[in-house]
Image (cartoon, grey):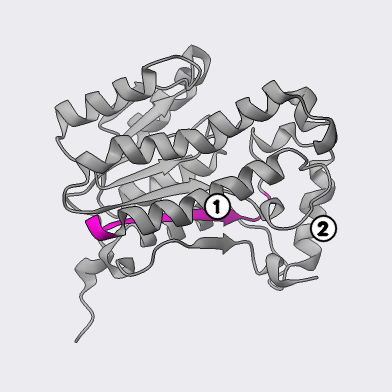
Amino acid sequence: MSFNPRSVSLEGRCGLVTGIANDQSIAWGCAKAFRSLGAELAVTYLNEKTRSYVEPLGREIGVGMTLPLDLGIEGQLEAAFDEIGTKWGRLDFVLHSIAFAPREDLHGRVVDCSKDGFLKAMEISCWSFIRMAKLAEPLMRDGGTLFTMTYYGSQMVVEHYNLMGPVKAALESATRYLAAELGPQGIRVHAISPGPLQTRAASGIAEFDELLDKAQSKAPTRSLVSIDDVGAAVAFLATDAAKLITGETLYIDGGYHIID
């Protein structure tokens, strides 16, 4: 069978992108790539401060909907999906790029983390992805793709990553289970694992600059990943060209994860 260029198009597709904070966000790199392949987008903002960054970015690429989403506010996630269902009546892909752990728990040893801090990190960083999958399922009548963001610290002990390591490991496991359960409906599920990036979320990790230097010096490509590198790979996985790829944790890190 010959290659069909339309298989790498997202024309006529609708997607939700969460987690944009500013123009350095991984979610922003993904949003740009989705739009470049022709997708219609809804994006979310956390609060009024973030809205002042997200709305202009959305206008820049012609986003169709900009919705509030604070996972700490009961019912706001459901309201976002209701709005999408009312306006579009369908959904083809969802990007979950949201993670959180209380600073005092993130900066301490895992063994010292509080119960409340652990549960909050799991709720915001992992359970919310499962909940998004549940809400997206009835809108993905023709199949679709769900994405979440993880990191190498889920598999290996990365200094200063601390509590987020076990949380991201749970997220990757959830990805596999969701892929198995939703696959019969044509819904694919992926965890995306970029190399270290200088984002607002990363600023919460102690000594992050040293982590960047180590990644650049040890990665086989000797280069750091950009938000646009991540976006290009994620957008491809949302297309029909990747319709038989699911349940993966995809590393976009210049090969860093293969090096001891």
Left or right: residue 235 compared with residue 143 = right
Q: Is residue 19 visible?
A: no
Q: Is residue 203 above or below residue 5?
A: above
Task: Give percent across and percent down for residue 34.
Answer: 34, 49
Q: Nearer the viewer, residue 181 or 168?
A: 181
Magenta part of the chain: 184-196
Q: Label 2 sits on what residue type? A: Lys
Tag of residue 172: 1
Q: Are marks 1 and 2 in contact (CB under 8 Å)?
A: no
Left or right: residue 121 compared with residue 77 = right
Task: Give percent across and percent down for residue 177.
Answer: 44, 54
Q: Quadrant of the N terminus?
A: bottom left
Q: Nearer the viewer, residue 212 or 141?
A: 141
Task: Give percent across and percent down for residue 222.
Answer: 73, 68
Residue lying at 76% horizontally and 61% vertically, measured from the top left = 216
Q: Residue 240 lies in what quarter of the image? A: bottom left
Q: Residues within 10 Å of mark 2 (few under 14, many from 20)?
A: some
Q: Is residue 189 visible?
A: yes
Q: Is residue 127 above or below residue 156?
A: above
Q: According to the image, label 2 marks what residue?
A: 214
Q: Nearer the viewer, residue 253 or 127?
A: 127
Left or right: residue 75 compared with residue 203 = left
Dot 1 or dot 2: first in sequence order is 1
Q: Is residue 117 above or below residue 234?
A: above
Between marks 1 and 2, how big is the CA–CA gap?
A: 24 Å
